[in-house]
Amino acid sequence: MSNVFYRAVNKEYLEVDYGEGIYLYDTAGNKYIDACAGAAVANLGHAHPGVLAAMAEQARKVAFSHLSRWTSKPIQELADLVAALAPASLNKLYLVSGGSEATEAALKMARGYFVERDGQSAKYRIISRWKSFHGNTIGSLSMTGDKRRKQYTPLLLNFPHIAPAYCYRCPFGKCQETCQVDCALDLERAVKMEGAESVAAFIAEPVGGAACGAIVPHKDYFKIIRQICDHYDILLIDDEVMAGFGRTGSMFSIADWGVVPDMICAAKGMSAGYSPLGAVIARQEIYDAFKQGSGVFVHGHTYGGNPLSAAVALAVVKALVADNIAENSRTIGDYLLAQMQAKLLPFAFVGDVRGKGLLLGVEIVRDKKTKEPFPVAMGMAEKLAVALLRQGVIVYPGTGNADGENGDQFLLAPPLIITKEQADELIAAMVAGFREFEKNIGQFK
Ligand SMILES: Cc1ncc(COP(=O)(O)O)c(C=O)c1O
């Protein structure tokens, strides 16, 4: 009887022993392809020698010093490197310890910015989208738009949500030929309904992640969003906790839409799982508002900006640049997507295969023509994930895609170092898992 309070208390967990590259090994000696990099985290794969060396070296020097008094070489170097990679004047790095802390900090930074700039500002609300995930703390969950928020609704902030950019199930009943990007225009409707004077920011993931299985918005989506934000004096927060640092095929995903946001939230791939770290990368103008105003951003967490995590992230980001990992993510991602569309989409229960770079998603349906989902009680996403696990492939299942309750999908987000041969190995194992799932589908209740 374990004394660990697991998330799903009745679930059986694999016991990890060690990892190497894209593979994880359990203590029973089984080998798995870590095809979701944990949760799109282990982007450099496991046991990367350069990162391990940087980590050990920094740990020997000093692992912790508090940001209330100390700065360190690793955080300064990391900030310089990130500033050089981030778009336009996004060159101020605010460090925290994870994705939820990053979006929570962005929320407060947006509010703080307007107070610093205008004095008595009424702007505090953050608009976000349904089928989004921005984290599990109360502020970040208030911005999140999926079923994870439901039981906590009484605790959440009164933040509006707009329609998702979800082409497979367009909320406006449009298709590719008739699309007028109504999902982007929905932001203007919400701003007018709520009153721009109360809205501080809009937050969105460039490519959807945990809540939707890699939905990719229309090519004009973020341009329209940027125009609306500018028109109504609203900050654009780009949540790249999952998509950032190479995952979708470029260092920052938003660049592919030709748009510059006001803040980028990062975490996961920025330290690639070697040490907990998150960040807000803010525009110079936001920083200046604090500098010329009170001089203080009233926020902070104990572990934010600790030298050990910063040294790890520095080694990770240097490796991403030196090895041109974003390019690998783009080319192998294109290859995997094409292979998945050719080999998985023909299965009767596969409704959609989509994504960008190595952030890929598979949506499963009961009826391919009508897109009717399986009832959530059947647990089909988890059943498919278990079928894949038996083939040695770990994916990241999710539900609620169709209507907030029903609708199954899984994310495929392997380490960005994956080779073409390994991608072929992954596809072959997935096809075998899908065949097994198909054979048993009639017996599932
Ligand atoms: C886009 C996005 N934002 C925020 C978060 C929350 O990050 P964390 O789990 O590190 O708190 C996640 C986690 O999956 C995410 O995908």
Image (spheres, rainbow, N blue to C red):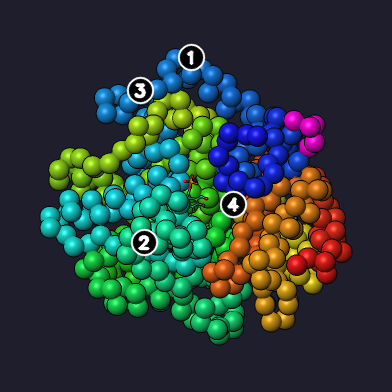
Q: Which of these two is toward me, 293 or 40? A: 40
Q: Where does label 3 land, which residue?
A: 65
Residue at point 73%, 37% (across, down): 23
The answer to whether mark 1 and mark 2 are in CB contact below 8 A is no
Q: Which callout, 3 or 2, points to the residue nearer the camera?
A: 2
Name the side, left or right, on which 9 lies relative to 97: right
Q: Mark 4–mark 1 contact, CB under 8 Å?
A: no
Q: Earlier in the sequence, mark 4 or mark 1?
A: 1
In the image, is the residue at mark 2 within 8 Å of ligand 1 by its beta carbon?
A: no
In percent of width and height, residue 187 lies at 38, 72
User: What amino acid is labelled 3 in the image?
Assistant: Ser
In the figure, is residue 326 to the left or right of 34?
A: left
Looking at the rendered image, the quarter that the C terminus falls into is: bottom right
Label 4 amino acid?
Gly
Mark nearer the N terminus (3 vs 2): 3
Residue at x 79%, y 32% (from the top left corner)? 28
| Disc 2: which residue | 154
* Magenta stretch encompasses residue 339: no
Marks 3/2: CA–CA distance: 37 Å
* Residue bearing mark 1: 60
Q: Nearer the viewer, residue 307 or 319?
A: 307
Q: What residue did someone put label 4 on?
A: 249
Which amino acid type corresponds to the residue marked 2 in the rendered image? Pro
Q: Nearer the viewer, residue 71 or 371?
A: 371
User: Which residues fall within the magenta stretch?
Assistant: 27-31
Q: Amino acid at mark 1?
A: Arg
